[in-house]
Amino acid sequence: MILAFFALSGLTVASALLVFVARNLLHALAFLVLSFLGMAGLFLTLSADFIGVAQVLIYAGSISVLMVFAVMLTPLASRNNGSTLYVIPAMLAAGGLASLIGFVAIDTEWDERKGEALGVSDFTTTVAGIGDLLLGRYLLAFEVASVLLLFALLGAIVLVQERRRAGEEA
Amino acid sequence: MPAGPHQLLGHRVADALEAALPGAVIGRHVEWIEVRSDRVRDVLRWLHDSESFDAAQLSNLTSVDRHTHFEVVYHLQSLDLNHQIVVKAIVEDHENPLLPSVYPVYKGALLQEREVYDLMGIRFDGHPDLRRLFLWEGYPAFPLRKDFLSLGQITGKAVNPGLQRFPFEDKESPDRMLNAGNIVTGEREASAGNAGGSAGAGH
Amino acid sequence: MSEQPMRPATPMLRQIAEHRSLLQRFMGVSKEWKGFALLLLGGLGLSNLAIAYVVIDGRLDGQWYDIRDLGNVTQHLRSWMQDEGFHPAVPYLTTALLGALGILSVVGGWLLIGSWVERRVLAKFQIRQGPNRTGPFGLFQPIADAVKLMQKEVVIPRVADKFLYYAPPVIIFIPAILGWGPVPWAGKMSFLDLNVGVLYTIAISSLGVLGVFLAGWSSNNHYSLLGAMRTVAMMVSYEIPISLALLAVVLLTGSMQLSTIVAWQANYNAWLIFLLPFAAFTFLFASTAEINRTPNDIGEAESEIVAGFYTEYSGMKAGLFMGVELGNAILVGAMMATFFLGGYTMFGLETWIPGYLILAAKIGAVYFLFVWLRGTLPRFRLDQLMGYAWKFLIPLSVVQVLLVAVEASIFARWETPALFPLAAFALLNLGLTVEMVRRWAHALGYAPEVAQQQPVMATAIGGLKAAQKMRGG
Amino acid sequence: MPPIPAIEDLSITLAHYLGLAGTVFAIGTVIALSKRNAVAVLMGVELMLNAVNLTVLAFSRFSAAFEEGGSAPLEGHVFVVFVLTVAAAEAAVALAMAVLVYRRRETVDLDRFNLMRG
Amino acid sequence: MNSTAEPYVLNIGPQHPSTHGVFRVRVVMDGEVIRDLDMIVGYLHRSMEKLAEERTYTQNIPFTDRADYLAAMSGNLGLALGIERLAGIDVPERASYLRVIFAELQRVASHAMANGTLVSDAGAWQTPLLYMFREREKILDLFEMTCGARLTTNYMRAGGVSFEPPAEFWPALNELVAELPGRIDEYMELLADNEIFLARTRGIGIITPEDAINGSLVGPALRGSGVPWDLRKAEPYCVYDRFDFDVPVGTRGDVYDRFMCRMMETRESVRILKQAIAQIPPGPHKNDVPLALRPPVGEVYSRVEGPRGENGFYLVSDGGPAPYRFHLRAPSLINLSLLRELARGASLPDAVVTLGSIDIVVGEIDR
């Protein structure tokens, strides 16, 4: 368990760093997918099986492909992964943020359950519970989310259509 | 009688052409008609458009090197009337042969004229895409001309002026212009020993 | 002279005339050898019958040495290790490694057998012999191929992106192995019996996309890139029909666990292919698109883009791609068998013969179907495939999901024997599927009677005027 | 500073997860703030969202209610489901916009977007 | 797919599965759509026309084998007819029948090859190709029995054919002719109603009859466009005027029509074969012709309907033993005149199928 946590977190953080360092946007994308997969593993250690698998499906499987298409639709010249001049202030701000979060995390007395994060006994199914909640208490939010997805779909289609028309005029 | 079974008599075609396009026909034969090279597109267009000749298809286009001049031979086919017309354009200029392309009349002339240009070196004015077809750009000669190689031929003709040896593609050269020294025009005798030596080494 | 049989005139005809079939050759061997072979076969059969009797008798049931379900063995091993007082991680790790080893060997064995079967069966379809020189019936041909591929030099394009060029063969191999995790081979014989098994399957299958894309992109070849973009577009599109088809399965069986789905089918003695014919068809068709098999192999369409995304790979790297393609076909066979063909069960037969053999037989049947399709059908075009997914499969699948939801809710409230509602659902679904497909296809402008217009026979020749006359008349 | 515990005594607590999430969030922030390419910025945003998801799941997992009740508290999971949904929608629209912006302005370099400067 | 991406150049060939030889096309692509196309040929150029000017007429017959190596008999026949007309040589009747039989067999074999590769281009993994190879193999066996060669037959001569077929030829031929209609029905069943094949070929690569005539298309490419033109009927050479056969003509001019025209022409060939086998008279297979033939001064353009269309031979004689000018009208090359117009705006798979339906033989293109 300890091993799993540290291996997965090491994988996640290292790939996230490599996303920042990588020169080529597609290399960065590959590392990003690796980071997503590590994150999915971490979710599994938190006995979130549904979310873990959904993470693989949505992030590693779909959003990365979307990004691939976005990268391929832009020309070769803009496929570098360069940084702007804001990199130093950004790092400072992020460092402050990280230390703040870490400080809060360590300093607070959490009302938490101690012990190993993953035992066999408490790796129960979460799917049925999530389904009950989604179609029960959070039905409204569920519907709103589906409407949001629909609008995202329509929005993307509208953007694409506008682009095509602009291309025809030009 | 080597004429085809459905070949129109040259005299008939020539008479009709004489009436429609005076001065275009410069020779008539029982099998073919000879036309001026600069009028060939008009002649073919007229034959293509005319009801009684209906030369709908250019079934064959080729050329013959007659040492002093070129003949460009057009075999026209009427599918509806099922007859064949042979038109020969006489290109007098053997050094720099040029005649109008018939591509505007027959789309099928596209590759056939390229082939004639490639192998016989006859340029077609108005062709949309006149490049070498089989041989590469910069090939130093036109192989189907009778003076392609300076070697003797078994037909008993005299030794022609031409290339000393068969040319090869020079991949090093950026534009693939190859062994320019191969082309021998005036000073052939002067460099004959040298070139002959290289030809011998080549074999 | 005419009485004598004529000697075939050409060497090839002579060879054909002198060829003897295997049966003829067997009949030609000496009596002793024939008797020996028959004795051997008979002994094998008798011993098998004896074992079968012991198994049917029930004396082996529940014991760890009951090989009808290898899950018994691992469970026995695990409980033994727990009793012995090892560190709590050790029994789990041991059994997990054993299971992983089992999966790897099964996949490896399938790769060897599958490539032989594909080549051999395809050869029979194409009236040729196929591999027949290496070993009996050419059975060692896959091994020879593997050795050859490993020996070959790996040529790396100078302009390739080295880092990303090396990764894809490995990247796409991982999901091909991982996908075997939740497949139940017998009642207790499942490596990773996830309760989100269906979702896991879909998620794993979506991972291969990136490997394919990186392979195509990093090769720096237009054919590769074209194949990769085709494959990526197709895989992304066909994930939706697959998800919808599996959603119908999940709705009806009420579980995302693969073992539960199989148990449901065994319980009601109803394979889901009878209940959900359109879902089964959608799954099969979309799977062929996902794994690049004919008639949807446009990602590596040989006659158009040479070898698609792995054009620039050579040696064992190309071998890995081909192996993954084959392994995916077998994995889809397993999924198809599990979801729609009753998995390791066969109407009660699984109590007699091991379930994994039944599953293997079903995988083999689906794989044979794939080979058959490959030997028969031409290939679709990219836009046709995309249109087929978006205009045809997805709308009809949505309708089917709605229908199945209603049926599932009825079924959940049904008290008396399940035979009647299931039979009714099967008939209803089949009829509605046929009708829906027909109407939707016509609505999309499908008109076979126009498309099959044959050429006409002309007795007289002519040119443009004749053509216009024939066309007008 | 407390002494570092031996590896046998170490147990993974909520603080570990929170620290990890903070680190990933920080990296995501750096990427989102400093990258020039619009797609790279989106990668940073996705990393930040992932970190948030990890935090929520950790809180859900380590909450006291998990131990007490028979049913696990799945509100956190539901929250993550919504985050995933919104992330997918956001990625689709944002990438479509990136492509559109490239079509219009021939670049995805965020430094060059100075429409508002007037 | 990504139709707004920047155009790029794709180099198809000279080594590519669907170019049927060393044919090369440089294609400017925009996503999957072809924007422009430039064909580059000449990788197999052997300068036959030049070489022929130094060989006697009989020595030139093997060149016709090597030009269209999938239809050697038709090439042989065209040149032999040309030489005969140029020199005024008569042919025995049996030789004419034998010529018809072999030319039609060659047409069946060549069409089998063409249709098989077309279906292969459409993506069927070689199965139809290998099925059609079965019949082609039998036909090539017949060739091998008769003249010893399978591809480069070198069979027709000025004044007849080189060999009388052996005794076992006729039963084998009868057997083949008896089983061919069934085989053709089998292929029709497999392909003519195949939904995927229809989807891939219907409405693809449409050539209008006007374009087909104006673009000098011949053979099945012309007939697929709806023009009922066949030299066997228009200018009956050999004894074709004694046989009863029809000309299949397409209705739309697309790839499917060209495919089906070939298929049905195969049936008509079987009809002709049956009639020819029934009618063939006894007699000599060859007239004596001097080896070093010296035709009178003149020129001739002889043509036959080969599997790919009008196989023309333009011979100019200056009275010597070798032709002064020897020109092959290559239907494969000239049928490609419209390739650029057909391919522009089509997608890559459509272009591949269209190229396959035009049925090129690179040996004939390059000569």
Image: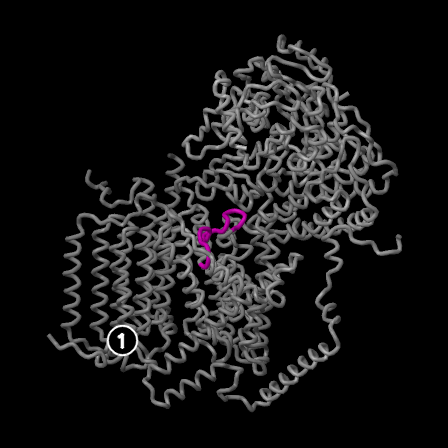
Which quadrant does the C terminus of chain C fall into? top right
Residue C20, position in %: x, y? 73, 63
Q: Is residue C201 magenta?
A: no
* Quarter assignment of residue E253: top right
Residue located beneath label 1 in the image: A2
Along the horizontal axis of the image, is D7 left or right of A124?
left
Q: Is residue C305 magenta?
A: yes
Q: Chain of mark 1?
A: A
In front of the other: C93 or B81 = C93
In front of the other: C461 or E29 = E29
Looking at the image, residue C443 lies above or below residue E107: below
- Secondary structure type for disc 1: helix
User: Can residue D36 be seen in the rendering of this structure?
Assistant: yes
Q: Kindly identify the residue that appears in the image at 65 percent across and 56 percent down.
A: C126
Residue E34, position in %: x, y? 48, 39
Q: Kindly identify the residue that appears in the image at 48 percent across and 29 percent down.
A: B137
Residue stretch in magenta: C301-316
In front of the other: C100 or C419 = C100
Residue B135, position in %: x, y? 52, 30
Residue C234, position in %: x, y? 46, 54
Looking at the image, residue D45 lies above or below residue D13: above
Q: Amino acid at mark 1?
A: Ile
Mark 1 packing: few (<14 Cα in 10 Å), some, or many (20+)? some
